Each structure stands twice: as structure tokens, then as C-alpha cells.
Image (cartoon, rainbow, N blue to C red):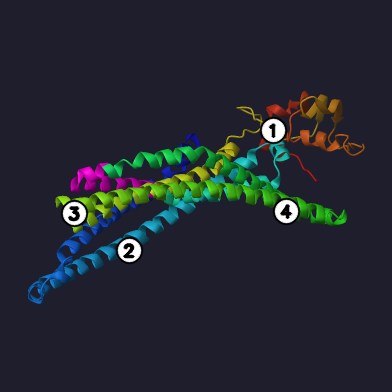
Amino acid sequence: MSSFLRLLQFVRNYKWPLFWSLLLVFIATGIGMIWPYIIGQITDQLGGFHELSEAAKAAKRPEATRFLLLIGAVLVALYLVQALINYTRALLLLFVGNRIVFDIRQRIFRHIQRLSMRYFDQNSHGHIMARVMYDVEAVQSVLSSGIVEIISNIITLLVALVFLYVLNWRMALVATCVLPLYVINFMMLKRRIRHAASDAREQYSLIYSILSEDISGIRVIKAFAREQHEARRFVREVRESIELNIKVGRLRTQLSVNANLLTSLANVAILGWGGYQILYTGTLTMGGLITFMGYQARLYGPVIALVRINDVINWVMAAVDRIFETLDTTPDIQERKNPIRLKRVQGYVDIEHVQFAYEPGELVLDDININAEPGKITALVGPSGSGKTTLVHLIPRFYDPTAGVIKLDGYDLRDLSLTNLRRNIGMVL
């Protein structure tokens, strides 16, 4: 939940488009609540028309015609207003969703650029690209339409409850007794869906990584005749991804099927009780039953929609967690609060008793001492893996020494501004 709340911080810059979207949701919900009442009125007005005598039909026909024309005009007007509202709301949400995706993507990209080289050593290019592209894309559905849909369905549910209790509080009690079962159904599967979705997204990142590395390194693959090996590796990971996606889909289908089953059983119960009141007690008309079941649909429909939306949010939260995991990653190389900025660099480099290890306890460099003077060429010669490149990477502070100190013009590199330091270093890789 903390990740979701942090995600909502990106919404603050677009509160007014969202406000107007919510206002349109209120209006559209109110319009939708008129339909069950109209259907009930039509049923009561015209339900027994075919059973009347010809004389009674002729007497009632003008009044019924006027009634139908009025209802038709009202419905056309409502549908036009609703279409305009839905179009405007869709455009607002389209704007908000894409702008928020832009904000998140540029923020995570800027943050990745500030991370230390160790992060890039530990994470493949494809893994990082999946965070910036695939994971951020998944967030758009929640931030654009998801939030508004949740609020819309909650409003519809509450209004429907009020109408149901006003129409028939006894039947409304039966209808609302089913609601806790929806919550239980969701809570039973929530954690399993979240974990399965997280595994599926991680597997997708792995496939993305393999594909990125194989395409960029195709010359090496061909040079060593590794095509079949890489193809088998790719197919193996894709097969694992499919199995994980099927697992997620099975859990989500189970959640949806259970919710629909609860709805069907509740509808049968209400239909049976309403039919009893029509046939035996006379306390309910056919139009009243149809009106009640219309509002009942507006009670269960939003509940099922909320289950599905929360299911989607549960799935997307796996991506959100990964996004904030990246944003929470702190660089290993930290700059002093008030770093020194050299105005003129002469170029004296002193490496004193330097040790370095990529992993604790596994030294790559041990007690290195070098003095490089400006105007002179200093060459590092040695076999592959002896640490030449590692030592050079310590000078622009891609890494910091495990022990010892490196100085530039007498200043410890750790006291200098990183930007200022690197702008005074020329590298030909």
C-alpha cells in the first residue's frame, strides 16, 4: 500500500483534470440510476395491455402512446448527454494517464543516470530497460482510468444501496448479505495473485534482458557458433514465462468466476422472494420487482467491477514495487555536501596504497601506488584480468577504493565535485 500511496504523489500535478473527471462521473452515475425506474414504470403502465378488451385498449392507447413518446424523448436526451460526458471524461483521462507515464519515466531515467557503476554491473541492460518501459507502461491503466473507475463504482454502489432500501428494505437486506462474500473471495486470492504477478513480471524482464543482450552481441554469438545454445535458452525462459502467465490467469479467472457465481445466486434469491410477494402477498408489482432488480444489478455490477479493478491493481502493484525499488536505490558514490570545484586542473594523479574489491573479500587491486605527472605518459601493462581497467575506473570515481586514497592535484577525489572532476577527464574507451 505504501508504494500505491507514493504513486498517487504523481497525480497531484493533475488534480484539476481528475476533479472534472470525477464530477462527470457523478453526473453519469446519476443518469444511469434513472434507467431501472423507467423500465419499472413501463412495465406497470403497459404490462397488462395485451390482456385488455379491444374497447379498453382503444381508450388507453392515446395515453400509452404519449407516455412512450415522452419516455423515448427523455431516453434519447439522456443517452446524448451520457455520450458527451463519456467522451469528455475519456479525453481527460487519456491526457492524465499519458502525462503521468511521462513524469514517472523521465524521473526513473534521470535517477538511473545518477546511479553508480555497481548498479549496472549487477543489473543487465534488458532488466533496466524493462523497468523504464514495460513496468512504467503498466502503471498507466491504474493512474488514468483505474482510480476514476474505483470512485465511480463506489458512488454507484452507495446510491444503489439507498434506492434498494427505499424500495424494499427486506429484499435489500438479502441483497447486501452477499457483499461480505465478495470481500472474502478477493482477500483469499489477493496475496497469491500478487506473488504470481510479481514472478511473471520478473520472468518477462529476464526474457527482455536475454533478447537485448543476444541482439547487441550477435557478432560474438555467430563467431562462436552459439546460435542453438542461445535459442534453447530463450525458448526455455519463454516457456517459463507462459507457465507463470497461465498461473496468474487461472487465479484471476477463479476470482472473477467466484464473483459472478455469487451474483447469480443472489439474483435467484431475490427473484424467488420477489415472485412470492407478487403471487401470494400482493405487496409487490411486476414493475416494482423489475425496478428492484435493476438497482440490484447496479449494486453487484460495481462490486464485480471493483473486484476486477483491484485484481488489475494487484497485478500492476508488482510493477509499481519494482519502479520504487529502482527509485529507492542509492548511488554507492556519494558527493560531499559542499564539494570542492577545481577551477584549473594541472593533472597530478597520486594513487596511494589503493585496494579494491567488487565483492567483499575478493581483492582485485592490492596496495597499488602510482604517481602520474602532467605532460608525461603513464602506461599500465598487464594480462587480461589483472585490474588495469578497474584502476582507471577509480580515477573518475566510477568506483571508490576499498582502502587507500586517490588524489588529483593533491585533493582527495572524494572531496571533489563529481561533475567538475569528470568534466576535467578525457577518456577514450
Q: Which mark is residue 426?
A: none
Mark 2 against mark 1, which lies toward the viewer?
2
What is the three-letter code of the residue carrying label 1?
A: Leu
Q: Earlier in the sequence, mark 2 or mark 1?
A: 2
Q: Which mark is residue 342?
A: 1
Q: Are marks 4 and 1 in contact (CB under 8 Å)?
A: no
**What is the distance, in whole Å, between disc 4 and disc 2 at their CAs?**
47 Å
**What is the distance, in whole Å, between disc 3 and disc 1 at their CAs?**
91 Å
Identify the residue position indicated by label 3 in the image. Answer: 278
- Above or below, comparing residue 186 to residue 72 in the picture: above
Q: Earlier in the sequence, mark 3 or mark 1?
A: 3
**What is the distance, in whole Å, between disc 4 and disc 1 at their CAs?**
53 Å
> Is 16 displayed left or right of 409 in the figure?
left
Q: Earlier in the sequence, mark 3 or mark 2?
A: 2
What is the three-letter code of the residue carrying label 2?
A: Ala
Identify the residue position indicated by label 2 in the image. Answer: 83
Q: Nearer the viewer, residue 411 or 35?
A: 35
